[in-house]
Amino acid sequence: MGEAFSLALQLVTSGNADLYEIVGLSLRVSLSATMFACLIGLPVGAWMAISRFRGRGAVLVLMNALMGLPPVVVGLLVYLHLSRSGPLGFLGLLYTPSAMIIAQTILIAPIVAALSRQVLEDLHTEYAEQFRSLCLSRVQTITALLWDARYSLLTVGLAGFGRAVAEVGAVMIVGGNIDHLTRVMTTAIALETSKGDLALALALGLVLLVIALGVNAAVQSLRMSARRQAYV
């Protein structure tokens, strides 16, 4: 075990090309998925935060339930749609980074929507009378809420990114774990462990842990910044 850790540290510090190619693809896929999930989830969360309609409770239950979507089920559904016999097979996206981005976006968009809805609903409750006095339209209200809650929403985005970068089931199914094409950190760790190449698996695991710690540190920093802004 000690030798494996030593080799893993050497791979990380020596700038191993294969390792950093895998890390780079992982970050590109996860950041892209997070961006698309925020573009979808934030408006949905904001609309749900300020809207009142019959059946809203059922929609909220569904939103919260979708936060726990099984990754392998999402991967299977995306696979069926992108396979040659599927409705989107003509796009030729299966076993490409694009397919992995689609799967991760579907997984984390409900998380972004549900968490942002809670943040924005609490803020809307606080400012509801002021918004009514200013006679703001729904779009203006949503814009004001999104801007005022920007620090908290960045935290939501980071939470989505943390979920995406640690995903393995869905990206394994739709990406195929192809070397130099769709192999990301989580799938590479699973593969290298099964092959007995613990050095590369540990090196990737160390990088993944550093990323996770960095995301948590960023979340904490944003929370502290939000509190300072509130006091000001």
Image (spheres, rainbow, N blue to C red):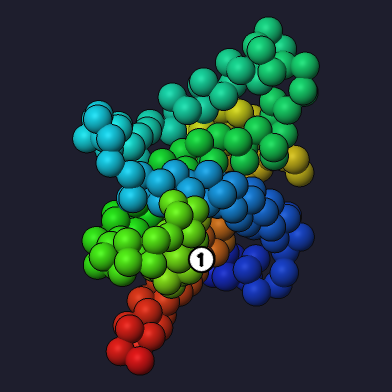
Residue 218 location, x and y as percent? Answer: 45, 74
| Mark 1 residue crowding within 10 angstroms, few (<14) / some (14–19) / many (20+) | some
The residue beneath circle 1 is 211
Is 181 situated above or below 209?
above
Q: Residue furthest bottom?
A: 232
Q: Determine whether the residue tagged by mark 1 lies in a helix, strand or loop.
A: helix
Q: Residue at x 61, y 17 (%)?
A: 81
- Regarding residue 146, the answer to whether it shows in the image is no
Question: In the rendered view, does 63 fall on the left or right side of 185?
Answer: left
* Residue 161 seen: yes
Q: Which residue lies at the image location 73% right of the left edge and 28% below the top edge?
A: 93
Of the pair 84 and 90, the residue shown nearer to us: 90
Q: Decide: is 90 above or below 130.
A: above
**Count of picture labels:** 1
Look at 46% across and 38% down and name the residue there.
107
Q: Nearer the viewer, residue 36 or 212?
A: 36
Q: Quadrant of the C terminus?
A: bottom left
The image shows residue 159, relative to residue 172, as above or below, that is below
* Left or right: residue 106 compared with residue 181: left
**Which residue lies at the image location 47% right of the left edge and 28% below the top edge?**
74
Q: Amino acid at mark 1?
A: Ile
Point out the image quarter for the N terminus.
bottom left
Residue 131 screen position, x and y as percent: 35, 64
Q: Nearer the viewer, residue 146 or 176?
A: 146
